[in-house]
Image: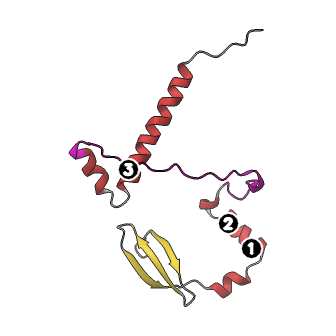
């Protein structure tokens, strides 16, 4: 079995070439190996069966999409922050996207802190 690579599809041309981004941020032009004729021939039932057998789709097929609310991600605010050298090195060793990972850790901490504060606050009583 070959080495697994995780890449992100950036774009695709009508000529069948695709541009992918590697985990390290490199872009590469590759020939698309997708058998589009086979995919076009699949029935809706075959597509649903394939999706239900794929763990990446677990729970997504039964969503009532008419009830979904689309929201924009929070806007990023560029700042200057001082971090301990070993902390910054740790995140940078993970490759590109280290600022996103730092943001995710801070967001997780913020969410947990809010939940703890909410749990500590006394329940509001209605007077009547």
Q: Secondary structure at mark 1?
A: helix
Q: How far is disc 2 from disc 3 in space, using C-alphas?
A: 39 Å
Instruction: State the SS at label 3.
Output: loop
Residue drawn at x 39%, y 66% is 23
Q: Percent from the top left, x then y, of residue 88? A: 27, 48
Of labels 1 and 3, the one closer to you: 3
Instruction: Let me know if residue 70 is in the magenta part.
Output: yes
* Label drawn at residue 15: none
Measured in 3D between alpha carbons, the distance from the residue under mark 1 to the one under mark 3, in whole angstroms, is: 46 Å
Kindly indicate the quadrant of the structure image that contains residue 43: bottom right
- Please state the total of marks drawn on the protein image: 3
Instruction: Say above or below: 36 vs 9.
Output: below
Q: Secondary structure at mark 2?
A: helix
Q: Position of residue 62 (x, y in %)?
A: 74, 55
Foreground pick, 107 / 78: 78
Residue 60 belongs to the span the image colors magenta: yes
Residue located beneath label 1 in the image: 46
Q: Are marks 2 and 1 in contact (CB under 8 Å)?
A: no
Q: Which residue is mark 2?
A: 51
| Span of residues in magenta | 59-86
- Direction bottom: furthest residue: 15
Marks 2 and 1, how far apart at CA: 9 Å
Tell me if residue 19 comes above or below residue 54 in the rendering: below
Residue at label 3?
78
Residue farthest to the left, as pictured = 85
């Amino acid at each position: 079995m070959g080495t697994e690579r995780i890449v992100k599809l950036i774009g695709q041309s009508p000529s069948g070439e695709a541009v992918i981004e590697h985990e390290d941020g490199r872009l590469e032009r590759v020939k698309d190996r997708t058998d589009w004729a086979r995919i076009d021939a699949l029935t809706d039932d075959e597509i649903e069966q394939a999706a239900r057998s794929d763990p990446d789709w677990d729970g997504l097929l039964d969503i009532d999409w008419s009830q979904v609310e689309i929201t924009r991600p929070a806007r990023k605010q560029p700042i200057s922050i001082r971090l301990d050298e070993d902390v910054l090195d740790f995140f940078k060793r993970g490759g590109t996207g280290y600022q996103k990972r730092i943001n995710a850790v801070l967001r997780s901490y913020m969410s947990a802190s809010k939940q703890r504060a909410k749990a500590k606050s006394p329940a509001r009583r209605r007077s009547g």
